[in-house]
Image (cartoon, rainbow, N blue to C red):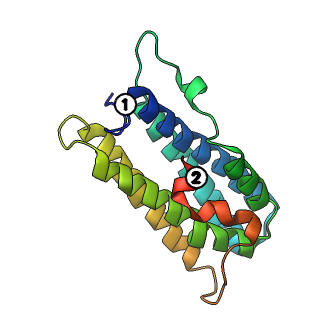
């Protein structure tokens, strides 16, 4: 597989991909639980979004470097920090409308910004497979975000303070 985004070094780039995978797996679990407990209006979206998160986690796992002496996928799939964990815990405690609104106005834009920044940092030649995966993940997430946005009112004022970390891609994946 391709090395992680250039300019970070192999292990730092692999750690970042592990953070992406962790976020995707955690979101899949949070949204899956919310879909089961949610209202019919949002259950279909939440279930589909959970599946999309799990699919993207698989994409990121395939991009992790594999070699003797390098950490394995399980070792790399860790949280980037307590701020993200706290925000994801808070996300799981929201009602359906607030959850979907927080996803489409805070978390998903931050994820897209992080991935698009990594695409820009990748070498077009040596990182071509990773660039392709990041673009596919971005396209899929943008489609999921559009589906969620169609379910939310345009007047939503944004996530509560407990979720502020979700809107900052630098804080999410530092």
Q: Residue at x 37, y 35 (%)?
A: 4
Q: Residue at x 38, y 28 (%)?
A: 10
Q: Are discs 1 and 2 less than 8 Å apart at CB?
A: no
Q: Quadrant of the rendered structure where residue 142 is?
A: bottom left
In the picture shown, does residue 171 fall above or below 8?
below
Which secondary structure lies at badge 2?
helix
Whether residue 126 sits left or right of residue 69 in the image: it is: left
Residue 57, position as x, y percentages in the image = 53, 41
Could you say whether the residue bearing mark 1 is in a helix, strand or loop? loop
Q: Position of residue 119 (x, y in %)?
A: 32, 50
Instruction: Residue at 77%, 53% (x, y): give it.
Output: 89
From the viewer's perspective, is 6 left or right of 75? left
Q: Which residue is mark 2?
A: 172
The residue depicted at 62 percent of the width and 53 percent of the height is 50
At which x and y percent is residue 111?
50, 57
Give x and y (percent) for residue 59.
44, 40
Residue neighbourhood size for the residue with mark 2, other residues' Cα within 10 Å, grouped as few (<14), some (14–19), many (≥20): many
Q: Quadrant of the N terminus?
A: top left
């Amino acid at each position: 597989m391709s090395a992680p985004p250039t300019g970070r070094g192999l292990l730092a780039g692999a750690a970042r991909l592990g953070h992406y995978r962790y976020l995707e797996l955690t979101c899949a679990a949070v949204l899956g639980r919310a879909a089961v407990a949610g209202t019919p209006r949002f259950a279909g979206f939440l279930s589909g979004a959970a599946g999309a998160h799990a699919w993207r986690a698989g994409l990121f796992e395939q991009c992790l470097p594999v070699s003797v002496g390098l950490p394995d996928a399980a070792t790399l799939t860790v949280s980037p920090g307590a701020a993200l964990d706290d925000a994801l815990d808070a996300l799981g405690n929201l009602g359906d409308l607030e959850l979907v609104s927080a996803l489409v106005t805070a978390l998903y834009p931050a994820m897209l910004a992080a991935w698009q920044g990594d695409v820009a940092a990748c070498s077009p030649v040596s990182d071509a497979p990773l660039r392709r995966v990041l673009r596919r993940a971005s396209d899929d997430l943008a489609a999921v975000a559009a589906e969620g946005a169609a379910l939310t009112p345009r007047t939503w004022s944004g996530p509560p303070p407990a979720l502020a970390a979700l809107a900052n891609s630098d804080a999410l994946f530092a």
